[in-house]
Amino acid sequence: AHQCYAPGPGRKARTLVEKKCLAHIEDLCGPLKNLKVLELGAGAGYLANLLIRTGAAYEGLEPKKDLCEKSAECFPETRGKIRPLFPQEAGLKEKSYDLIIASNFLQYVPEPAVFVRSLAALLKDGGRLYLEVPNERFLRVRILVRRALHLYPGRTHPGNINFFTPASLDRTLAAGGLSAAASGQLTLIGDPARLEATLNKKPGLVFRALAAAAAASRLDLLLQQGSLFRLCVVRAPDRLRQ
């Protein structure tokens, strides 16, 4: 909560990061107006604010109560639309949503395959699940990058209990009864706005040069140092479609 709302250039950069995230989701899903959208891990409310402005029927869940309160304070549009609950506690109705967004959430969830299956049950036929998680395939390299950027006191992001590779993420989805209709990686090092939001200050010249080099060469993606995304679509059984 402190990092999300700390004064400084990071807040403006965070808005830019979430605008890119929304544009990416719209590229995959089309316009969101009038769709019923559930966001898991609504966090600081930056993406929630943007989703509400698209005209989507938005609902958010954020387990940290202090983040919910701060979101409503900073983004009045989100007031009453983000609840301080974990999904299993929220009493959500099956087949209720057109789109569920779980960006940087699945790495915190016990029994992720069981959790994915529960999300699939919440989607209408033809509904979509958008997931984004850190790619931890080359974890030692990622730890070196994190230490160079002075991101965390430990080896990984605090609270992460799942460490996904592309293969293990796809196995988790399959175990949850889903498969990816669209998949890929998103750059982290090659995105100056994301670096600025993470550090809450403008990156120094060296880091800006590294970001430019990564963006031009896609080297960070070749080294599996981006974020993984997956878009899954829930299909009605054939006998029902007929």
Image: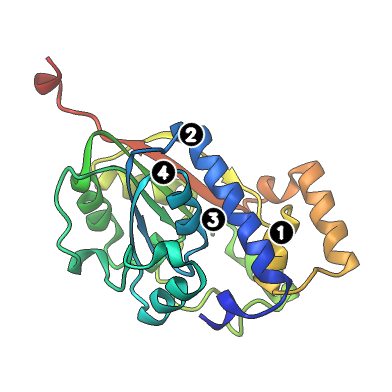
Of residues 70 and 124, the one drawn nearer to the viewer in this rendering = 70
**Could you tell me residue 237's position as x and y percent?**
15, 26
Instruction: Say which mark, if any, is on residue 193.
Output: 1
Select label 1 or label 3 by which is in front. Answer: 1
> Which residue is labeled 3 in the image?
135
- Any part of residue 144 in sight: no
Determine which quarter of the picture holds residue 174. top left
**Could you tell me residue 9's position as x and y percent?**
73, 71
> How many residues crowd around disc 2 within 10 Å: few (fewer than 14), some, or many (20 or more)?
some
Labels 4 & 1 near each other (Cβ < 8 A): no
> Which residue is labeled 4 in the image?
55
Up-down: is 39 above or below 35? below
Select label 3 or label 4 by which is in front. Answer: 4
Mark 3 or mark 4, earlier in chain: 4
Identify which residue is drawn at 17% across, 42% down. Answer: 95
**Could you tell me residue 215's position as x and y percent?**
77, 46
Which amino acid, by three-letter code, is at mark 1? Answer: Ala
- Whole-angstrom CA distance, mark 1 to mark 2, is 22 Å
Identify which residue is drawn at 53% across, 33% down. Answer: 27
Labels 3 & 4 near each other (Cβ < 8 A): no
Of residues 158 and 100, the one drawn nearer to the viewer in this rendering = 100
Mark 4 or mark 2, earlier in chain: 2
Question: In terms of secondary structure, where does tag 2 sit?
Answer: helix
> Which residue is labeled 2 in the image?
28
Mark 4 or mark 1, earlier in chain: 4
Picture mark count: 4
- Whole-angstrom CA distance, mark 3 to mark 4, is 32 Å
- Whole-angstrom CA distance, mark 1 to mark 3, is 19 Å
Question: In terms of secondary structure, where does tag 1 sit?
Answer: helix
Q: Residue furthest right?
A: 205
Question: In terms of secondary structure, where does tag 4 sit?
Answer: loop
- The answer to whether 25 appears left or right of 198 in the picture is left
